[in-house]
Image (tube, rainbow, N blue to C red):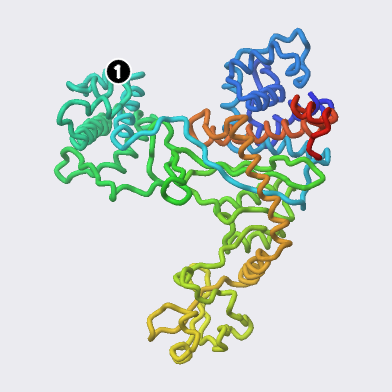
Amino acid sequence: MRVRDALGALFVDEDFTRGEFEEMYAGLGRPGISPALLVMVTVLQFLHNLSDRDAAVAVADRISWKYALGLELEDTGFDASVLCEFRARLVTGDRADGLLTLMLDRLKAAGLVRAGGRQRTDSTHVLACVRRLNRIECLGEALRAALEEIALTSPAFVVALLEPGWDERYGRKVETSRLLRRKNASALKLAEQIGADGQSLITAVDADPTAGWMNGLRQVKVLRELWDQHFERTATGGAPRYRDTGELPPSAMRVRSPHDPDARYSTKGVPGAGAVEWTGSKVHLSESCDEDLPNLVTDVHTACATEPDVSAVTPVQDRLIARDLAPGEHLLDSGYPSGGNIGASLERGITLVAPVTVNTGRGAHNATFKPKDFHVDRQSGTARCPAGATSISMRPKKNGLIRVAFARADCRPCPVRARCTTAAPHLGRSLEIHPEPIHTARMRMQAEQDTPQWHAAYRARAGIEGTLSQAVRGPGLRRSRYRGLAKTHLQNVLTGMAINIRRLGTHYDTTPANPERRPTRIHTLCTQHGIATAA
């Protein structure tokens, strides 16, 4: 209500007739419900973490919602299914990011966000809306889902494949605890049996010239992908061979659930009690953190769970630049900066404020000299080591780095060789550095991060942890409501918009805070008798 009083309507119907939303609605037919209204209802739904039905009820009977939405008191709202249909329209293309852009355009016009300021980014994991499956369960569920999808339109095709035992294995959800509870049951034999059953279905589809349309079914596509990953066809054409774990593709490519093919298994942290492992995706939230303005979410980036944080810097900055909200300083943790990101940020005029790893390479744990201890002269193409020796070569490598090598004649008798290299005695020291201007920027960042001024500025990064906590504990960011990366991204964007509404409401709250806490009875009695402790 306070946001509407201060800023008016954040969205209007005309916003959904251009740009990413131009083809969102057909030009013919009966007019639908106002998309500007549905966007605000959806944002409020995520703000309060409500289901579609509860959100529709809130529109009909909550006077605060009616005021915020600009509805008459007599308005009876709409059916809950409208929200699901509206989200289906928003998933297409870049419409989810377009929603956040529309909100930020309004806030930028109101002077609540600006370019050239300070912003911070961090990530957290998102659990997929599926149960965790082992290999056998994943394969069995894929086959069961494919059979169910085919039986929906062509039951006669499935009938010809039915064999004894199929009802036990695929008649309901596949659980190894149920299928292997028999005495002497073998998990390997069960996997091979599921593989043979799935191969018979694939062979039947390929052999029937009238069944080609089945290859376009979603679950049949997933079935083929999983069988290629977990089974190897034999030369005799018999039952496929069940692959060993070491033969499986990497986690970034492996399907973990047929019901959400985009979900991936990943871990983070030190292996052991402190490690976090999950199946799902990852979300990166960026927010402004200028001292004179409210902290508002400026970008939401959803990525595969296996993608490292370093790969998110460029797309996040590209969207911020497209929204005319490029930060002057971008605060990140140590997982984001890399040589490429530092160079790209310099070209964009953005300063990365992040800890740069100092000890890298084979000598990282041996207290050897680091690249910053060497003086590099780009004009002469040489480098000078701490002992005063000059390099004999400086050549670029295929990975973009530059390899600097020193002569064996200089390194063998060097008195500080033990502090310089752990290589064999007949080898000289070599190091790899970044090209200019990345090397200079990296050395500058390493020197600055040891100063009190840098630590004082970097303290502002910790605030993004509170934003992630607010998103997890309020709108429920930790668990995806929907299946698929596109729908999960839409949920993440709506969560970021909901956080903005919450913080704008706090920003416009003129109610004076009561700094005094009501004293306890014991404190009151001690004060009356003159034995209270001085504050």
Asked if residue 236 shows in the view, the reply is: yes
Q: Amino acid at mark 1?
A: Pro
Image quarter in which the C terminus is found: top right
- Please name the residue shown 25% across and 24% down the image: 169
> What residue did someone put label 1 on?
155
The residue located at (22%, 23%) in the rendering is 166
The 10 Å Cα crowd at callout 1, few under 14, some 14 to 19, many 20 or more, is few
Q: Quadrant of the N terminus?
A: top right
Q: Residue at x 48, y 44 (%)?
A: 305
Q: Is residue 389 above or below residue 102?
A: below
- Residue that lies at the very extreme toward the top in this rendered image: 74
Q: How many marks?
A: 1
- Residue 440 left/right relative to 65: left
Instruction: Decide which of 517, 172 is in the foreground and name it.
Output: 517
Dividing the picture into quadrants, the one containing residue 104 is top right
Q: Residue 364 location in percent, x, y?
A: 48, 69
Q: Does residue 155 appear left or right of residue 295 in this picture?
A: left
**Could you say which is closer to the camera, residue 405 or residue 199?**
405
